[in-house]
Image (cartoon, helix red, strand yellow):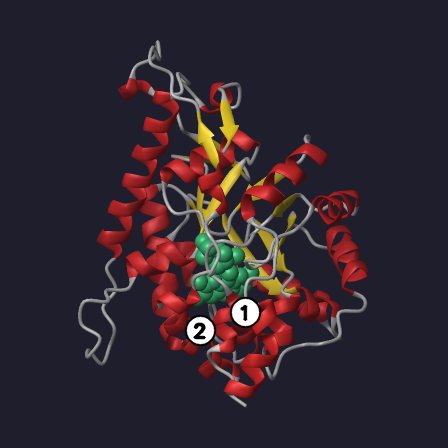
């Protein structure tokens, strides 16, 4: 059984391979924003700026939670932090457990990215375990985090040979965290989605935002299945594309919990997907896998130390923002509030 650091590095490699993608079509393709041939607004004056956690951002976008706790992950996190700061989008880090346990700190990320929200991360089972609340406090403190995301990943854990199987007590731990922690709590999935009734329950517990993290992008069942024996992988074959497609859970959660902050993620590919998610009712949109693919230079896989290309990622972030602005323009929306009044249809 791999130790946590080896596992995290293997996850990074697998997350960038085509097998990490869901085998199902991307649900965002089922929504079409209606074209407006007479927009009555200026493309160069479209306003996509946003406020999140008290910061002014250039767009309602953030770099989704990815890994942490290894040397390689630290380099990646530093590059992500610098890029998020320079592009003025928010940053979520991956699980801080391994880092906190092996004494490596993420404190420098705050220095690299002083003007954007930084969101910490911990697994729900770790939060529910012995000392879980202290671990969450340490995670927030180390990062000087503006919020902490607690991830729910029962499917991923079930497929992992070393995964956590006992999910009893998680709800109570989240409720306790909401009361005791000094920063807002976000609850997210990792690619299998959060449905409307669970989201409703989480908001009743007082969580600030729910990130649906639905099916359609990075697929953890497929990633974990690639790390286990063929026999075990066969066992999980019927579950390879288990989960709630992002568009479906986003629509359901927004309908059920219209006055709450809902974050869209899971298979968001570009600025047009971002626009669609905002139209449905998301207040922020996050991308994980696509950010990693832009950052890590895959052109030469022989290099001993992998090459990071923050410029490529910055360029992609700018392109995604331009695509978002174009989608607003083509629906006749001068800003995000008017986009939500635009027409669209399910196809
Ligand atoms: C992740 N994700 C993740 N989520 C989390 O809450 N804690 C974590 O430690 C990680 N680790 C992680 C590593 C890597 C390499 C990737 C690509 C992703 C899940 C991530 O935040 C997101 O929910 C899913 O990847 C779905 O979004 P995308 O990738 O389809 O945009």
Residue 281, percent from left and from top: 57, 32
Ligand 1 within 8 angstroms of badge 2 C-beta: yes
Q: Which residue is mark 1?
A: 221
Q: Which residue is mark 2?
A: 11
Q: Quadrant of residue 170?
A: bottom right
Q: In the figure, 284 relative to 295: above or below? A: above
Residue 104, percent from left and from top: 47, 75
Q: Quadrant of residue 73?
A: bottom left
Q: Which mark is residue 77?
A: none
Ligand 1 within 8 angstroms of badge 1 C-beta: no
Q: CA distance from mark 2 to mark 1?
A: 11 Å
Residue 153, percent from left and from top: 62, 65
Regarding residue 125, the answer to whether it shows in the image is: yes
**Callout 1: 10 Å neighbours few (<14), some, many (20+)?**
many
- The residue at the point 60 percent across, 43 percent down is 248
Q: Secondary structure under badge 1?
A: helix
**Callout 2: 10 Å neighbours few (<14), some, many (20+)?**
many
Residue 303, percent from left and from top: 19, 78
Disc with the residue nearer the chain's start (2 vs 1): 2
Regarding residue 16, the answer to whether it shows in the image is: no
Residue placed farthest to the bottom in the image? 1
Instruction: Please state which of the two labelled residues, at mark 2 or mark 1, is closer to the viewer.
Output: 1
């Amino acid at each position: 059984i791999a130790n946590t650091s080896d596992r995290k590095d293997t996850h990074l490699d697998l997350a960038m391979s085509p097998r990490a993608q869901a085998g199902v079509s991307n649900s965002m393709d089922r929504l079409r924003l209606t074209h407006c041939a007479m927009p009555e607004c200026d493309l160069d004056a479209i306003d996509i700026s946003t406020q999140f956690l008290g910061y002014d951002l250039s767009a309602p976008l953030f770099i989704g939670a990815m890994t942490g706790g290894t040397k390689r992950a630290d380099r990646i996190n530093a590059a992500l932090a610098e890029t998020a700061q320079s592009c003025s989008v928010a940053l979520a880090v991956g699980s801080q457990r391994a880092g906190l346990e092996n004494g490596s700190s993420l404190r420098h990320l705050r220095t690299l990215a002083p003007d954007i929200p930084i969101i910490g991360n911990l697994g729900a089972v770790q939060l529910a375990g012995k000392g879980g609340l202290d671990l969450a406090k340490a995670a927030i403190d180390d990062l000087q985090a503006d919020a902490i995301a607690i991830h729910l990943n029962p499917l991923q854990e079930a497929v992992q040979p070393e995964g956590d199987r006992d999910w009893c007590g998680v709800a109570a731990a989240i409720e306790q965290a909401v009361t005791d922690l000094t920063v807002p709590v976000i609850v997210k999935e990792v690619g299998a989605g959060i449905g409307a009734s669970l989201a409703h329950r989480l908001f009743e517990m007082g969580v600030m935002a729910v990130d649906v993290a639905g099916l359609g992008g990075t697929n953890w069942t497929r990633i974990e299945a690639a790390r286990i024996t063929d026999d075990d992988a066969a066992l999980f074959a019927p579950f390879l594309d288990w989960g709630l497609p992002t568009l479906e859970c986003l629509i359901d959660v927004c309908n059920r919990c219209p006055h709450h902050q809902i974050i869209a993620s899971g298979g968001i590919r570009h600025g047009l997907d971002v626009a669609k998610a905002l139209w449905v009712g998301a207040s922020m949109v996050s991308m994980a896998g696509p950010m990693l693919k832009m950052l890590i230079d895959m052109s030469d896989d022989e290099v001993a130390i992998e090459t990071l290309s923050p410029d490529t990622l910055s360029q992609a972030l700018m392109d995604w923002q331009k695509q978002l602005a174009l989608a607003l323009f083509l629906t006749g929306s001068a800003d995000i509030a008017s986009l939500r009044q635009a027409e669209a249809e399910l196809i």
